[in-house]
Image (spheres, rainbow, N blue to C red):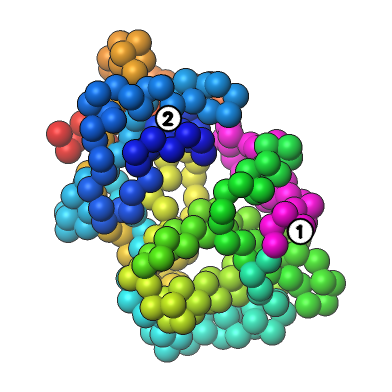
Amino acid sequence: MENNNLGWIYYNHAVITTTAPHEEPNLQPLWNGSVWNLRSSRGEKPLLARYTSDYDCGKDTGFWFIVKDAPFVMEDLSKKYQKHILKALERCEVRLIDAVSEFEDIYEVYKSAVENYQNVDNIVSKERMQEGVKHDGLEYWGAYDKKTGKMAGWMSCSNNGDWTETISAKYHPDFFSYTRPSDAIHYTILNHYLNDLGQKYICSGSRSLNHKTNVQDYKIRNWKFRQAFCKLHIVYRKDINIIIKLIYPFRNILKKFDSITAVHQINSVLKMEEIARKNR
């Protein structure tokens, strides 16, 4: 993420708002065009601007944030899952870590995890990720396998005072099933931010359109997160807007070629456009 400008920031070929999901974004930089001056650290121009409105509107808009806005109570979970968590805590130690000094372990887990993904088009290089860790200001939680002492997984969180956003999490495939680092980390962060700090909610991101993931279902089913529906808005750079208008009618044809990385990227944008059009 680069170049904060009155609540907007460059991220992954787009400019997005930095306001909390429940807050109304400052749209003035969008209307006066100043957001288009934002650049990545490599000088890349944004292709589009994305923001949301009508947080937790109560109707299915096709776009949502995954949130937990109630205190974490272990007894609210199924008895079967409570057993899973206790096993995870027996096999795993979770602690707040210094991401800079433990970066090698963080990247090893990241690399091992993303190699199992399908249709991933934004893999981060080691150098770029290391630079990001130095300056992102996030809180990193590491889970360590008690038998080997190796890092089994990690999660980064943005602590915003009265609410927290989970930014990224990766788990090493070799430890995922037995050590269950995901369960141990989620138990720890829910206790820390919701119970110990008494924050309003934890947000676990928005609907994923880039690749298939079961993460949100996992959080809703096992940890009692919920979907907070909102309206998605997309505004394109002028030249990109023309291209979107031309190719949008052919979106179903393009889906047949989704295995091609470039087409997959286009399809992700067209999916966002489809969702945004339904709520205009």
| Amino acid at circle 1 | Glu
At x 36% / y 15%, what residue is drawn? 240
The secondary element bearing badge 1 is classed as: loop
Q: Is residue 78 visible?
A: no
Q: Which residue is mark 2?
A: 14
For this orientation, the residue located farthest to the front is 6
- Crowd around label 1: few <14 · some 14–19 · many ≥20 (10 Å): few
Q: Nearer the viewer, residue 148 or 130?
A: 130
N-terminal of the two: label 1 or label 2? 2
Horizontal side of 156 relative to 196 (left or right) equals: right
At x 69% / y 84%, what residue is drawn? 90
At x 55% / y 21%, what residue is drawn? 43
- Crowd around label 2: few <14 · some 14–19 · many ≥20 (10 Å): many
Q: Nearer the viewer, residue 160 or 238?
A: 160
Horizontal side of 175 relative to 51 (left or right) equals: right
Whole-percent x, y for residue 107 in the image:
73, 49
| Amino acid at circle 2 | Ala
Q: Eyeballing the image, is 269 above or below 222?
A: above
Q: Which residue is mark 1?
A: 102
Whole-percent x, y for residue 113 in the image:
68, 50
Q: Quarter of the image holding residue 239?
A: top left
Whether pointer 1 and pointer 2 mark residues with C-beta atoms closer than 8 Å, the reply is: no
Magenta part of the chain:
98-125
- Magenta stretch containing residue 106, yes or no? yes
Q: Nearer the viewer, residue 107 or 257?
A: 107
Q: Nearer the viewer, residue 158 or 69?
A: 158
